[in-house]
Amino acid sequence: MKKFIKGVRFAPKNYSDEVEEKIQHYKKEGYKLPSRHLLRTEEQLAGIRESAKINTALLDYISANIREGMSTAEIDHMVYEFTTDHDAIPAPFMYEGFPKSVCTSINDVVCHGIPSTKEFLRNGDIVNVDVSTIYKGYFSDASRMYMIGEVKPELQRLVQVAKECRDIGVQTAQPWARLGDVGAAIQEHAEKNGYSVVRDLCGHGVGIKFHEEPDVEHFGKRGTGMLIVPGMTFTIEPMINMGTYEVFIDEADGWTVCTDDGLPSAQWESMILITENGNEILTE
Ligand code: MF3
Ligand code: CO
């Protein structure tokens, strides 16, 4: 009898023979495939779904309560209270040193804005609220845009097109398609509308950890990149800029990502599960 080397993982087989056959086929053809631990087991999926449910309820709660004049620290407080009331943990809190429970990104802030008692939502602002939840060790992640008071039509259009980009990305993320197909579809829609796609930040695998493989770029070339396989869970979260796609990180806090040219940016984020015949939105 062969001896197992200590440390070999016992992984339950979490896909059908049909999927296994396709994996083998594409492997032989030399495609880049996700490693097997990225294909969720039924047990993992049950946990991820519960986490995602809380995450969506949290976004609904924010949607119902966000108001002009409120500080971003108040949004942070709502997120912390709601999440802990549901026996869950806000994933951003102390993640690589991030000091708050949620990212709040206003106007030219692309993402990772840090809530503050000194920052207020003003008439005409567009703000992204990005929430991520840990429940029983399982991670979920999604974000929405909010328009505060009377928002200029050109900003409304940016928010709308950013949402369409996210939705087109989700529609393109089909089993046995390629990640490059997703990026290309998003980029095409953004550029067709006169906008640019941020290059320096991407979507990501999520579920067992906050940020896992693969990177999900929101630009790219069709027919390139990793094969999309049933059982994967990842985010699609394109950041769409009105001007240049170049961004910089605020030196003062080490987190806040801003557009280089000071023009506004918008982002919507969904977390999806790839199934054998399509995909399922877990939270958005
Ligand atoms: N929620 C962000 C994402 O969509 C990540 C935020 S990391 C944090 O991936 F530390 F800033 F919270
Ligand atoms: Co994310």
Image (tube, rainbow, N blue to C red):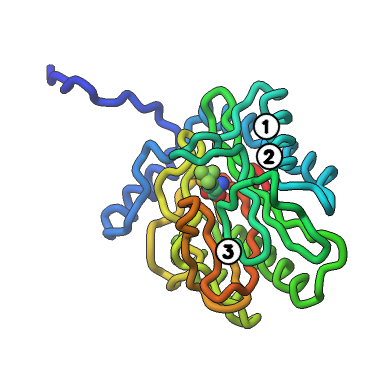
| In-front residue for pair 210/275 | 210
Circle nearer the viewer, 3 or 1: 1
Q: Mark 3 and 1 residues: CB-CB less than 8 Å, in contact?
A: no
Q: CA distance from mark 3 to mark 2?
A: 21 Å
18 lies above or below 93: below
Q: Mark 3 packing: few (<14 Cα in 10 Å), some, or many (20+)?
A: many
Confirm or reject: label 1 Cβ below 8 Å from ligand 1: no
Q: Which residue is rendered at x = 38% and y = 57% of the image?
A: 226
Instruction: Kindly identify the amino acid type of the residue bearing the numbered disc 1.
Output: Tyr
Query: What residue would you read off at disc 2?
Result: 76
Going by the image, does 13 lie left or right of 10? right
Q: Mark 2 and 1 residues: CB-CB less than 8 Å, in contact?
A: yes
Q: Secondary structure at mark 1?
A: helix
Q: Mark 1 packing: few (<14 Cα in 10 Å), some, or many (20+)?
A: some
User: Quick one: label 3 or label 1, which is nearer the N terminus?
Assistant: 1
Circle nearer the viewer, 3 or 2: 2
Q: Position of residue 236 (x, y in %)?
A: 56, 55
Q: CA distance from mark 3 to mark 1?
A: 25 Å
Query: What residue would you read off at disc 3?
Result: 239
272 lies above or below 109: above
Q: Secondary structure at mark 3?
A: strand
Confirm or reject: label 3 Cβ below 8 Å from ligand 1: no
Going by the image, does 4 lie left or right of 62? left
Going by the image, does 105 lie left or right of 217? right
Going by the image, does 155 lie left or right of 214? right
Instruction: Kindly identify the amino acid type of the residue bearing the numbered disc 3.
Output: Met
Query: What residue would you read off at disc 1?
Result: 80
User: Quick one: label 3 or label 2, which is nearer the N terminus?
Assistant: 2
